[in-house]
Image (cartoon, grey):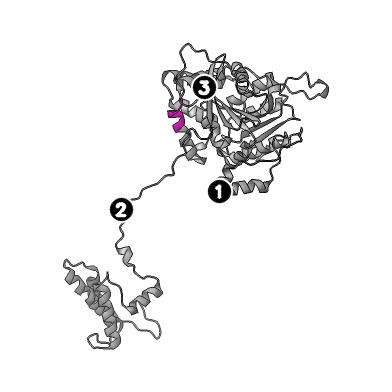
Amino acid sequence: MPAGVGTSYRSLGDLGEDVYKSTTIIEQSHQTTGQTVLQSVKKAFSFASPKIDLRKKDPLIQEQRENITIVTRNRNKMPTAATAEEYALLGTMPSDSMDDIELKNIQLQFPALRYLSRDEGSVREEKVETDKGSIVVAVQGNRAKPAIVTYHDLGLNYISSFQAFFNYIDMRVLLENFCVYHVNAPGQEEGAPTLPEDYIYPTMDELAEQLLFVIGHFGLKSFIGFGVGAGGNILSRFAASHPGHVNALCLINCVSTQAGWIEWGYQKLNVRHLRSQGMTQGVLDYLMWHHFGRGTEERNHDLVQVYTNYFERRVNPTNLALFIDSYVRRTDLNLTRELDPSRKKEGKTLSVPVINITGSLSPHVDDTVTLNGRLDPTNSSWMKISDCGMVLEEQPGKVSEAFRLFLQGEGYVAPLSPLRMADYRLGCLDGLNHLCMKKIDWPSATMHITENPISEAVAC
């Protein structure tokens, strides 16, 4: 390489070859290795400063040699004060604690799953005798308060369908003003024995008529219906036949038409598998799709695991097959909307106020739209909640808010201010159990609002 003007360089020659060999060739003995490294350092210093003799006891050179010896021979010891300052400035201070740490394995920890178990403290179960056998009704709240009657969907009961929702913080405030009666379809309650082979399962109309025995058993004059899926269809049939016993309806993913050919084929195959093989993977996939729609695994993995384990271990397959067979044989509700005010009495539709709720990811969105088209627009509302399929589990806050506004619009509870609701939530979150358990005496409402505050389709 040519030298530039005013510059000079020196060829390494044999010295460079010795330095290269001494720094790259690995010796077998540790002592020889230490000596070779020291010799290489000496040669490097002699090349950098050819006029300086390393054997002379120059103070600066002697200090550098001592530092090199300390770093080479005592790697696991703390450096001197001078070298410690240099390490600190360079950000390379060695740590004694890191020398003793060894990563052996990595263990993943998953959060505990939420199990669907009975809440023994706040719910009392009673058997109600009907003309089609006995059914189990769970009572939650003070029976002196107005009644809310719930009915579950396929493959569920009151525990897996409503218990978590009614234990939600916002719903506890409403429970101070109501008593909830959870109706279980025959053979669908927790730990139900297998129904006899000669048992004829009630039709959807007969299941609706069983509610007359429920209100007679508990002495109810009227109630507010809260139904999901098949339960919503049953409550709608009862409201159409006995409008005097129903004050209002909250329907979630309710279907008002008879089963189509595709649904009929799938459900008949499910019934066959449940009776012969039990809960197969095909039946399990259909139930998960029926309740959550598609893509649930990606958006809520924990919830999928909870209900998968529930369907596999806690459901009686024979009893579920009978319930599914009754649901797939359902008839049309025959509801028609009459817009002419002079002929409204001739039209057959639900005369009670209705709030119709669905999830944007639910497979029953079109069915709820069809039901909304059959209802009277002056006393019905349609609501679609985004990013969910099973709205009670995935969006309980939005459903509870909509249900509270719906009841306030019908005059069943006094208006609850946002500040008072916030105080209640804050008390529960801060661990003030006495505030959560304390009975709150809201002022009784003396007015009755006939117009639904959610009069138009709302998408949250």
Mark number, residue 266: 3
Q: Amino acid at mark 1?
A: Leu
Q: In this orientation, which residue lies closer to the viewer: 412 or 318?
A: 412
Q: Position of residue 325 (x, y in %)?
A: 53, 18
Front tag of 2 and 3: 2
Q: Amino acid at mark 3?
A: Tyr
Q: Which residue is mark 2?
A: 104
Q: Which residue is mark 1?
A: 432
**Dot 2 lies on which element?**
loop
**Looking at the image, which residue is at 74% across and 27% down?**
376
The magenta region covers 309-315
Mark number, residue 198: none
Judge the density around disc 2: few (<14), some (14-19), many (≥20) Cα neighbours within 10 Å: few
Q: Which badge, 3 or 1, comes first in the chain's sequence?
A: 3
Whole-angstrom CA distance, mark 3 to mark 1, is: 50 Å
**Looking at the image, which residue is at 60% across and 46% down?**
425
